[in-house]
Amino acid sequence: MLKIAAAGMSALFLAVSPLAYAQETTGKAVAPSSADWGALTDARINVVKAALQLTPEQEKYWPAVEDAIRARAKNREARISAAASRVRELRSGDLSVLRDRDPVAFLHRRADALAQRAADLKKLADAWQPLYQTLNPDQKRRMAFLAVLVMHEMGNAIEQRRLQSEEEDEAG
């Protein structure tokens, strides 16, 4: 089990590292392409599937899980792209953009994004439920291990983005 988890995590780190550390020579982060997002999603799916070692009986539940993961990743990519566009607009130097901000429109955008994330997460949970009920204790432990590791990595990525943002604010 440990070998499978280690191999899976190695594959995940290899897939994520280029996206997390991509930078231009100017020091600004490079936005991942659609192909990059697709490769990252494929890697994540493959890591989870390899770690679980599904039986042929369990395999019939996997397509719904994979579809939900892909839909959630696609919507996440769209949200990140939209947020990056808004940040570029705000940093364009046009002060009228800052002066004319509409806080109510912001709240509506935020509510829509949260509603989309909630719907995606519900779809993912609904897709996982039938498969999870068929997992044996070892598979459940591997799934829990991956979940903890993913949450830890997400926290690290968020902290790194926060520090990078602070450095850019200080430099600019």
Image (cartoon, rainbow, N blue to C red):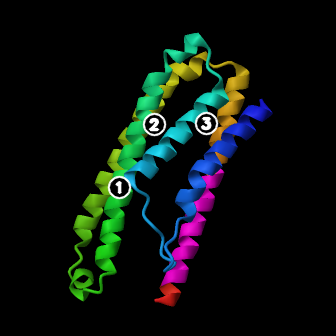
94 relative to 75, above or below = below
- Res 148 seen here: no
Segment tinted magenta in the rendering:
152-168
Please tell me whether residue 166 belongs to the stretch shown in magenta.
yes
**Label 1, label 3: how many angstroms apart (C-alpha)?**
24 Å
117 relative to 133, above or below = below
Q: Which residue is mark 2?
A: 69
Image coordinates for residue 66, horizontal then vertical, percent: 46, 30
Label 3 is placed on what type of residue?
Answer: Val
Please tell me whether residue 27 belongs to the stretch shown in magenta.
no
**Mark in the foreground, 2 or 3:** 3
Secondary structure under tag 1 reads helix
- Left or right: 105, with 150 as reference point: left
**Residue visible at 44% across and 44% down in the picture:** 38
Image coordinates for residue 30, horizontal then vertical, percent: 45, 67
**Residue visible at 40% across and 33% down in the picture:** 123
Q: Kindly indicate whether the residue at mark 2 contacts the one at mark 1 (C-beta within 8 angstroms).
A: no
**Residue visible at 43% across and 24% down in the picture:** 64
The answer to which of marks 2 and 3 sits earlier in the sequence is 3
**Mark in the foreground, 1 or 3:** 3
Secondary structure under tag 2 reads helix
Q: Kindly indicate whether the residue at mark 3 contacts the one at mark 2 (C-beta within 8 angstroms).
A: no
Q: Which residue is mark 1?
A: 79
Disc 2: CA contacts within 10 A as few (<14), some (14-19) or many (>=20): many
98 relative to 39, above or below = below
**Label 2, label 3: how many angstroms apart (C-alpha)?**
13 Å
Label 1 is placed on what type of residue?
Answer: Arg
Q: Which residue is mark 3?
A: 47
**Label 1, label 2: how many angstroms apart (C-alpha)?**
15 Å
